[in-house]
Amino acid sequence: MKRFSKAFLFYVLSTLIVVIWMIPFIVAFFTSFKTMDEIFMLRNFWSPPRNWTIENFKIAWTEGRMQRYFLNTFLVTSISVLATLFLSSLSAFALSWYNFKLKTVILVIFVAGMLIPFQMLLIPVYRFSLATGLYDSLMGVILFHVAFQIGFCTFFLRNFMVTIPTSLFEAAKIDGANPFVIYSKIIMPLVTPAVAALSILEFTWIWNDYLWSLILLQSDSKKTVTIGLTALQGQWISSWNVIAAGALLAAIVPVTVFLIFQRYFIEGLTLGSVKG
Amino acid sequence: MINFPVGACPQDSTLWRKRYVKRDRLTPYLFVAAPLCMYSIWVIFPILQTIAVSFTKWDGMTKMKFVGLENFKRLVSDNYFGLSLLNNIKWMVGFVVLSIPVGLIFAMLMDQKFPGHKVYKSLIYLPMALSFVVIGQIWSWVLEPTGGVINTFFRFIGLEQFAKPWLSDPKIVTYSLIMAALWRQIPYAMILFLAGLKNVSKELVEAAIVDGATPAQRFWYVILPALKPAMVIAITVNIIDSLRAFDIVFVMTRGGPYYSSSVMANYMYVQAFHNYRMGYGASIAVVQFGITLGFIIMYLLNVLKREERE
């Protein structure tokens, strides 16, 4: 009986919380399927559309150029994630398997860097991009993301690598394997789960970035989805239905990735914070 | 693939590593060279440059002029900066006093593990997958004065006086923004606490039940002490996040009306990139960094301390 009342309480409370929690989503969802007439006549955000239409998504996708922004974001995100994972696995390998003078210093710099306010980097990175011709190019944004995320990724991968028994490493060394072979054939296959978790986390972070695209990109053809969405807000000011459709389009990729790989996402977030 | 006899070699890593290091001094540097180089160009040098620029007067085009502490002196008497700093403190307090307890309550509830708790968790986590631009847009409809969800709700239950212009009233606009940000921040705290709850010893909780401890006593004397590491990290990370707040402010209000919802990050951006006062902007960033640094060090000490224990 006690178990039953406890379960009852759990379901009532949880359902209540989730319903309230989902309201903003529902609002966006309803709005995105409404016609312009309905938006102007009713001017409310909570009622479901009377005539469902997918016209708004088409407008946001083509006229709102979300199509283009999607492609840009996809390029930026996928290249950044791959490059960051590769580079940080190298530094993580060095920091976890070798004892060298600057080891602790480098590790502390990597960890501290991931927490600094971006404002500390804005002016120099912007100037640097202008000076090197990286300004207003996707490459400029990619290089920044890769460089910045190296800090967190190195820390993250290192924490995994130090848990691998050293005997594996030593055995390989005795067998005459060179360090790069040890890195690629022994260590990397063993940290695949960590790399998976990390790539999910990095994917959503970089996909959702706003500030760096704002600072480093200018022309419309280079914009990423987050910047594109704000452009949409400027262009379709009171067409809330189109903006809502654009917002849902901008959200759909990270949300899907998150839902499919949620376990990795959570593991990624808790490592380096709670587990240490 | 090489076959390695697991356990055939001495397990003591420190001894072995010492021996190994002598022969192989260069290798680790080769591995860190490329990542460290990129990190230096885009992160380390910029930090130093920003500090240097904060002592200058510079519009980004003409020659930089060294002005010493002039920018920082001006910050002290700049009301808009004061307002931004005050708003950051509101963010900080808001994050700590709301996302920590609410996140903890959510985590305790979801830790019950009744069938279906995974679905509930997924739905609560969902805002974390969204960009702040999307969150800002969605919340501007929730907060919209005429047809927005919150005001409609208040009118519906007959509490007309609580229906407010959430984003245009300078007195409440910051709280509205914090509310929107909490939608993403609470699940984060919840994740940290759920991970922390795994460290709560089941035996200890059961022993407390046998000894007749009330649920409140169990929470206070058994669960909460076990959650302390998670709590420290959650508070530190929340404070650091509150000091970094930018996107949501910029997207929803641009810091307005009349700077009333401005935060340091946003004020820095406006000064440096709209008003072309790079030196002044840099000095704002340095103050923001200085305040954050204290908490970053706290975080680092916590992480490193845990490393030592392991």
Image: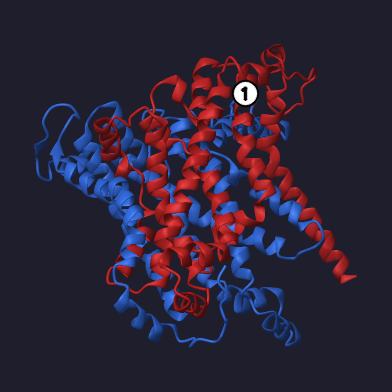
Chain colours: A red, B blue
Bin the neighbour count of mark 1 within 10 Å (Cα to Cα): few under 14, some 14-19, many 20 and up. Answer: some
Q: Residue at x 42, y 78 (%)?
A: B308
Query: Chain letter of disc 1?
Result: B
User: Residue B138: x percent and y percent?
Assistant: 60, 32
Disc 1, SS = loop
Question: Can residue B142 be seen?
Answer: yes
Q: Residue at x 56, y 77 (%)?
A: B4
As shown in the figure, which amino acid type bears the numbered disc 1?
Thr
Residue beneath label 1, please? Answer: B146
Rendered position, A244 above or below B55? above
Rendered position, B207 above or below B144? below
Q: Residue at x 62, y 32 (%)?
A: B142
Q: Quadrant of the N terminus of chain A?
A: bottom right
Rendered position, A69 above or below B111? above
**Total numbered badges shown on the rendered structure:** 1
Q: Quadrant of residue B208?
A: bottom right
Residue B150 placement, left or right of A171: right
User: Residue B155: x percent and y percent?
Assistant: 68, 30
Residue furthest front in the image: A176
User: Residue B141: x percent and y percent?
Assistant: 61, 29
Question: Can residue B93 be seen?
Answer: no
User: Residue A105: x percent and y percent?
Assistant: 30, 66
Give the camera-side residue of A173 and A63.
A173
Give the camera-side residue of A124 and A170.
A170
Residue furthest right in the image: A1
